[in-house]
Structures are given as structure tokens and as C-alpha cells.
Image (cartoon, helix red, strand yellow):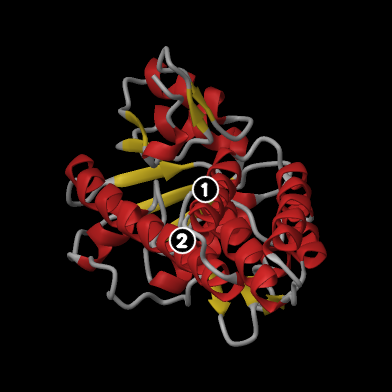
């Protein structure tokens, strides 16, 4: 798997530089409708984040950084000071849209650093706008490369004929491309591994049944949906070989924060002596 590998879905977070807009797959419409929408204002981007039209920590970071850069690029400013004031206003609105998403703040902070650097170097308005967009695009490219590395490292955890349980959605829909926890599953599938994935429905918002099952089916991966309270039965029956989940945050002591219900799955996996793996990008690690 490489950054140019084809995937059954288009990138769920993309952009149109000529229009100055961010393009997302509206996840509130899934699985019944596959609708890509353009976001051309900060208010539209904030609404998409708040309403979970776009979700997943890495995807939020890419949307926020691309969004603020592209919207700024379309505006006319009389001077650099006006641009900075506008940027800071948009920055605060986006930060408040999802305060718990560390990738969102990290992405915005990187674009802000690019702004400060551009101003210090004395770039004109057009030069500053280009620097912001280029930094945001770089963030997306780095996310794709991180997903590829997670796929390659995670593949060592998967064997032929494995039956894998996953929880919530840590796949293609949550990132720029491929996924975090699901990326090694897609790589294993591409390499011809005979695997089967069991996806928990993940109440109350059903990210497993609505999103994970949707993308696994679209990618041609053998999969089954199970209700959340079937986990113990499936493990006790010997139907699960390992568990792979994503994570929202990893604390300094190694504790993992993820979607509510993940601890239940982890406790059951330990009880039944089933390997439990957490896969996530370095951005989810607390600064040591």
C-alpha cells in the first residue's frame, strides 16, 4: 500500500483550491446515501464538525487546517494586519467546534505557525495565503503517510484466517485515506489474507454499523455486524482471534481513551486471553 494506491472510496476529506473550498463525505447520510459536500465558509465548516458530518481525529485536523487556509485565501484584505485578525477569529471558532479533538488544534496551530513565519519573513498577502494552503496540504499528505506506516506495522499483528473484532470507526472515514486501526486490515486484504472482521454496532451513534460496515463492504473485506452485547459470547465461543481498535488519546502512563464501550471490549479480551491491540498515529500520544 502506498500513497498512490487506489481505494474503493474517494478521499473523505479533500479540497478544491480554485474554489477555495473543502470537500467532505457527509457521514450523517451514511450508509444510505454517499453525498460529498463543499464547505466554503468557516460557519459551514464549524457546522459540519459540530453535526459530525466529518469526524475522526485525523480527519478533523485536515478539515480545520485546509478550511481556515482556503477560506482566508478567498478574502480580500487591505493589509496583513487585517488578515491576522480574521485568521485569529476563524481559529477560535474552529477550536471551539470540537475542543476535545487534539488533531484539530494541532493542525490549526501548525497553520498559525506558518502564518507567523510568513509575516516575520515579510511576505505579501498572496505569499502568506500560499504558505497557509501549502502547510495545510502538507498536513493532509503527512496523515496519508502515517496511515500507510500504521498499515505496515499493524500487518504484523494479523495472520491468515484471522477473525478480527473492531469497535467504533477507525478506518478510511476517520482520516485522509486508508485509516488507522483498519489500515492493516485493508493491507492484509490487498495481500490476499483470508480474514473476517466483526464490527460492533457501537451505540449510541452506531459508528460501527453505519460507518465501519459501510466502508468494509465498499472495500470488499469479508465482515459481519454484531450488536455490542454479543462481544462476550463471540469471544467465549472462540470466534475472535484478536481485537483491533483505534484511540482518541494515549496518556503518559499508557492509558488509552477511546469511544465509550471500548473498555468493556478490552476487559473481555483480557478475560478470554485474546490479543487486544490499539493502533493510532503519534498525534494521539500525550507529550512525554
Rounded to the nearest whole Å, what is the CA distance between mark 1 and mark 2? 9 Å
Disc 2 target residue: 135
Mark 1 touches mark 2? (CB < 8 Å): yes
Residue 250 place in picture, x, y as percent: 46, 26
Which residue appears farthest toward the top when viewing the image?
253
Residue 176 against residue 276 in the figure, above or below = below
Task: Give the side of residue 91 with respect to residue 244, left or right.
Answer: right
Look at 39% across and 62% down and name the residue there: 178
Disc 1 residue crowd, few under 14, some 14–19, many 20+, Cα 10 Å: some
Q: Which label lies toward us, 1 or 2?
A: 1
Look at 62% across and 51% down and name the residue there: 207
Residue 217 against residue 242 in the figure, above or below = below
User: Which quarter of the rendering shows the N terminus?
Assistant: bottom left
Residue 113, labelled with which disc? 1
Look at 62% across and 40% down and name the residue there: 101
Look at 32% across and 26% down and name the residue there: 274
Task: Give the side of residue 11 with respect to residue 144, left or right.
Answer: right
Residue 163 place in picture, x, y as percent: 32, 46
Q: Earlier in the sequence, mark 1 or mark 2?
A: 1
213, 67: nearer the viewer: 67
Task: Give the side of residue 88 with respect to residue 279, left or right.
Answer: right
Disc 2 residue crowd, few under 14, some 14–19, many 20+, Cα 10 Å: many
Residue 12 appears in view: no
Task: Give the side of residue 216 with respect to residue 151, left or right.
Answer: right
Q: Is label 1 in a helix, a strand or a loop?
A: helix
Amino acid at each position: 500500500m502506498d500513497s498512490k494506491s487506489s481505494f474503493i472510496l474517494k478521499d473523505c476529506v479533500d479540497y478544491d483550491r480554485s474554489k477555495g473550498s473543502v470537500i467532505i463525505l457527509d457521514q450523517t447520510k451514511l450508509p444510505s446515501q454517499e453525498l460529498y459536500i463543499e464547505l466554503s465558509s468557516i460557519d459551514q465548516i464549524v457546522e459540519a464538525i459540530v453535526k459530525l458530518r466529518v469526524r475522526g481525529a485525523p480527519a478533523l485536523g485536515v478539515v480545520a487546517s485546509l478550511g481556515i487556509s482556503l477560506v482566508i485565501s478567498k478574502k480580500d484584505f487591505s493589509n496583513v494586519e487585517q488578515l491576522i485578525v480574521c485568521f485569529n477569529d476563524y481559529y477560535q471558532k474552529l477550536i471551539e467546534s470540537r475542543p476535545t479533538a487534539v488533531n484539530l488544534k494541532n493542525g490549526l496551530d501548525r497553520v498559525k505557525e506558518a502564518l507567523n513565519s510568513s509575516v516575520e519573513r515579510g511576505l505579501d498577502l498572496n505569499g502568506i495565503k500560499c504558505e497557509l494552503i501549502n502547510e495545510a496540504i502538507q498536513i493532509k499528505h503527512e496523515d496519508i503517510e502515517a496511515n500507510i506506516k500504521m498499515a505496515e506495522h499493524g500487518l504484523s499483528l494479523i495472520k491468515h484466517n484471522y477473525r478480527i473484532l473492531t469497535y467504533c470507526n477507525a478506518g478510511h472515514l476517520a482520516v485522509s485515506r486508508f485509516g488507522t486501526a483498519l489500515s492493516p486490515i485493508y493491507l492484509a486484504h490487498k495481500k490476499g489474507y483470508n480474514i473476517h472482521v466483526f464490527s460492533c454496532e457501537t451505540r449510541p451513534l452506531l459508528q460501527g454499523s453505519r460507518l465501519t460496515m459501510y466502508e468494509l463492504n465498499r472495500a470488499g473485506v469479508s465482515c459481519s455486524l454484531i450488536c455490542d452485547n454479543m462481544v462476550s459470547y463471540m469471544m467465549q465461543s472462540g470466534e475472535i482471534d484478536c481485537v483491533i481498535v483505534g484511540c482518541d488519546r494515549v496518556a503518559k502512563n499508557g492509558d488509552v481513551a477511546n469511544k465509550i464501550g471500548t473498555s468493556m471490549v478490552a476487559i473481555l479480551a483480557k478475560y478470554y486471553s485474546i490479543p487486544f491491540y490499539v493502533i493510532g498515529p503519534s498525534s494521539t500520544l500525550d507529550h512525554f
